[in-house]
Image: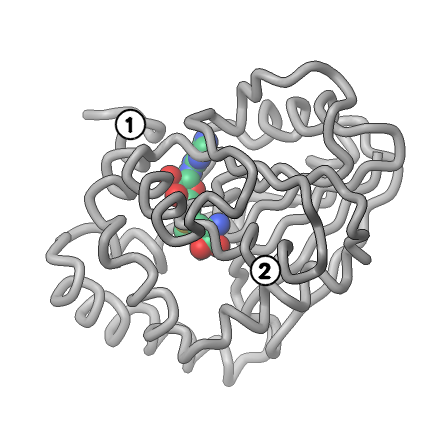
């Protein structure tokens, strides 16, 4: 049995070429709005030095570029996702490097912002990643997490389960040709929601303030932690 780190890395390397299409198709394009809204809530400043962790094919970093941010770096442990990011952005985004969220090889206090969209749920050690974020951020620097959650409204919960358990895995399997990847998504969201309290984990990692917002009837959450 492979450990979580190896399983997740293999999974994203395998589905990388279908990732963007499936992402926008399965969310009906709402994922674009979620990333934009998360950056607005962060009050992202154009002088920021931003590290987009679990950057994948780069949609969060590319959105940040539209906010006028010049210094943007991407970090991800999947080589294939990074390769697509570089191809897609034509290297307009700083440098994208193969790194683990849990072990960012950065000097202390080097970036003003860290962003993670739909990545934290996949980390093999969230407390370790948040400590690593805390060290890499400057004083008053912010970490912004965008992640799925289970909707709080009962009707939405039912619709969510129907969509995520029966529709999404079938489309995901056909398009990505990966049997497991799109079953993993609903299972990991439910498990994550039951067991992980991001706000508490940020405080434990030493952040001084943490804010949490629900978007689109509680389908996704934005958590912003300030050092
Ligand atoms: C669902 S994708 C999100 C990509 C992108 N942020 C977006 O908004 O579309 C999750 C990404 O997290 C990366 N990832 C998962 N765990 C990681 C870890 N521990 N360290 C670095 N990258 C990780 C995967 O390789 C994958 O590219």
Q: Quadrant of ligand 1?
A: top left
Q: Is mark 2 within 8 Å of ligand 1?
A: no
Residue at 49% of width from left, 56% of height from top? Answer: 59
Quadrant holding the C terminus:
top right
Q: Nearer the viewer, residue 200 or 83?
A: 83
Determine whether 120 is above or below 106 in the image. below
In what element is the residue under mark 1?
helix
Would you place residue 55 above or below residue 156 in this image? Answer: above
Q: Are marks 2 and 1 in contact (CB under 8 Å)?
A: no
Image quarter where the N terminus lies is: top left
Where residue 154 appears, x then y in whole percent? 54, 80
Query: Splitting the image into 4 quarters, where does residue 28 fall?
Result: bottom left
Mark 2 or 1, nearer chain start: 1
70 or 188: nearer the eye?
70
Could you say which disc has been placed on residue 63 in the image?
Answer: 2
For the point 23% across and 25% down, the residue is: 2
Q: Viewed as shown, does residue 57 lie left or right of 101? A: left
Tell me residue 33's x, y (percent).
Answer: 58, 73
Beta carbon at label 1 within 8 Å of ligand 1: no
Residue 56: x and y in percent read 41, 45
Dot in front, 2 or 1? 2
Please tell me how crowded label 2 is: few (under 14), some (14-19), or many (20+) other residues with Cα within 10 Å. some
The residue beneath circle 1 is 6
**Distance CA(mark 2)–CA(mark 1):** 29 Å
Nearer-the-camera pick, 87 or 203: 87
């Amino acid at each position: 049995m492979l450990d979580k780190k190896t399983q997740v890395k293999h999974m994203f390397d395998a589905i990388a070429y279908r990732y963007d299409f499936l992402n926008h198709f399965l969310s009906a394009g709402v994922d674009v709005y979620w990333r934009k809204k998360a950056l607005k809530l962060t009050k992202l400043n154009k002088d920021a030095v931003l590290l987009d962790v679990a950057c994948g094919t780069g949609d969060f970093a590319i959105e940040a570029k539209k906010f006028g941010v010049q210094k943007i770096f991407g970090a991800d442990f999947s080589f294939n996702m990074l390769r697509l990011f570089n191809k897609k952005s034509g290297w307009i985004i700083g440098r994208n490097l193969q790194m683990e969220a849990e072990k960012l090889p950065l000097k202390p206090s080097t970036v003003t912002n860290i962003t993670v969209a739909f990545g934290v749920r996949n980390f093999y050690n969230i407390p370790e990643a948040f400590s690593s974020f805390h060290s890499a951020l400057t004083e008053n620097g912010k970490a912004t997490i965008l992640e799925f959650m289970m909707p709080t409204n009962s009707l939405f919960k039912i619709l969510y389960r129907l969509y995520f358990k029966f529709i999404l895995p079938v489309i995901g399997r056909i398009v990505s040709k990966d049997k497991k990847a799109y079953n993993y998504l609903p299972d990991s969201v439910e498990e994550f929601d039951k067991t992980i309290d991001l706000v508490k984990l940020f405080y434990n990692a030493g952040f001084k303030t943490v804010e949490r917002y629900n978007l689109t009837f509680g389908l996704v959450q934005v958590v912003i932690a300030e050092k």
